[in-house]
Amino acid sequence: MAPEFVIGFAAGQKVEAKKSVERFRDCDYMDWTIRHGFYANMGGFHLKTPDLQSSFPINATQLLYLVREKHLDYPAFSGKDVWDKSKADGFQKLFTCIQTGWFLVQCLGRAIQKLPVTTLELSTLCFVFCTLVMYIEWAHKPLDVASPTILTSKTTIADILIAAGDQAAVPYRQTPLDFIDDQSPSWLTEVQPHLRFRRGPPERPLPRFTNDRFPVIAASLDAVFFFIISMTYCSLHFIAWNFKFPTHVELMLWRASSITLVVTALIFWACETYQDGVRLGRWERWHKRLFPDRAEKEWRKRSSNEVKEKAMFIPAWEVAVMTPVTVFYSIARSYIVIEIFLSQRSQPSGVFDTVDWSKYIPHF
């Protein structure tokens, strides 16, 4: 239904993996790669301690903390070892990209020869576009890892928590290392507590990461790239602006849905850009630079509740704005998916013609 959100998760995971590389190399672990970051953040490393019967997953941030605090030795696990865990090799990915790329060439050929394209082919083109981008974002991510790498520590969890002090005093919700990184923001930590159904695996510590962490891309080239890709995906539906539909009503509904996709995407980006700046303190830093005296007075007047409210991941105003945006987006996407199949009942005869590739092949 929404492949651009999958790209958002992929982009967020890549950003987190790149950040882990910077953090490890700041601590002189120069052989830590983006593959290690992906592998760790997907739960590839499990920690085994003397006082727990079973192991539990740790991400890159938690692993670096344990290594830095001498609770765990740096894992002798190379990038090749990480890739050896993956079930998909480079040839398989290349073959998939060639298949999807050939479909793009076919659509381009039909456009050049002025052959009609169906809404089904156009929608497939949109998904192929997102698939290629997803492969780029996940180029270094291992696929379908069946068994984790167990890292054994001689230090007990109790001793790790005692050494951490007050920051580890709050009871954990997922793993004992939540005080380092609790996997938030995620569906499990921010959304499901407000719903009335089971919140992920019942075991504690979690036997695996739920892989539902919301992407926090922040202001970077990755964010610009994701913005361009998401807006391009939504805009591709405008290609069918003058397609022949079975009825004029269906044509107008397709146009309205295409506009709705772009508008809701822009509103989403505007809200997320603003709220991301609030979460990371970006706007406050700019305010202090531009108006240092005024910013200091406002900070003193601000209560602790106001500070806490500004730090909320999903504030009330964003829920109020994004709820109708999500509803309109869902209606527009649903109509497009339904119309893809409804429009097949009446198509111009040219859709059955194939591209004459002999026109592009030199011959005598």
Image: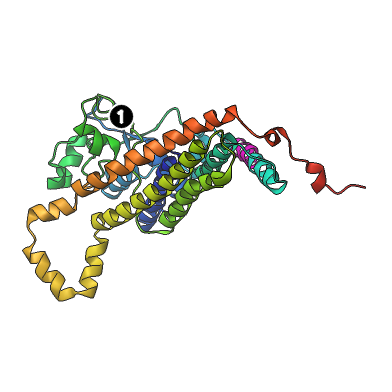
Tell whether 131 sits left or right of 60.
right
Q: Judge whether 315 appears above or below 176 on screen.
A: below
Dominant SS type (magenta) = helix
Count neighbours of disc 1 (C-alpha within 10 A) and say few if under 14, some if 14 to 19, many if 20 or more.
Answer: many
Q: Can I make out residue 27 in this image?
A: yes
What span is colored magenta in the figure? 92-101
Indicate whether residue 100 is drawn in magenta. Answer: yes
- In the image, farthest residue toward the right: 364
Quadrant of the image containing the N terminus: top left
Question: In this orientation, which residue lies closer to the viewer: 343 or 105?
Answer: 343
Q: Position of residue 348 (x, y in %)?
A: 66, 35
Indicate whether residue 315 is drawn in magenta. Answer: no
Asked where in the image residue 170 lies, by quadrant, the reply is: top left
Q: Position of residue 45 (x, y in %)?
A: 37, 36
At 63% from the left edge and 39% from the top edge, which residue is drawn?
Answer: 117
Give the residue pinned by disc 1. 55
Q: Colour mode?
A: rainbow
Q: Position of residue 362 (x, y in %)?
A: 86, 49
At 42% from the left edge and 33% from the top edge, which residue is drawn?
Answer: 334
Q: Position of residue 149 (x, y in %)?
A: 40, 33
At 78% from the left edge and 42% from the top edge, which residue is drawn?
Answer: 357
Question: In this orientation, which residue lies closer to the viewer: 66 or 289?
Answer: 289
Tell whether 106 sits left or right of 83.
right
* Kind of residue at disc 1: Ser
At 16% from the left edge and 43% from the top edge, which residue is drawn?
Answer: 168
Q: Regarding mark 1 in the picture, which secondary structure is present there? A: loop
Question: In this orientation, which residue lies closer to the viewer: 247 or 350?
Answer: 247
Q: Can I make out residue 31 in this image?
A: no
Asked where in the image residue 51 lies, by quadrant, the reply is: top left
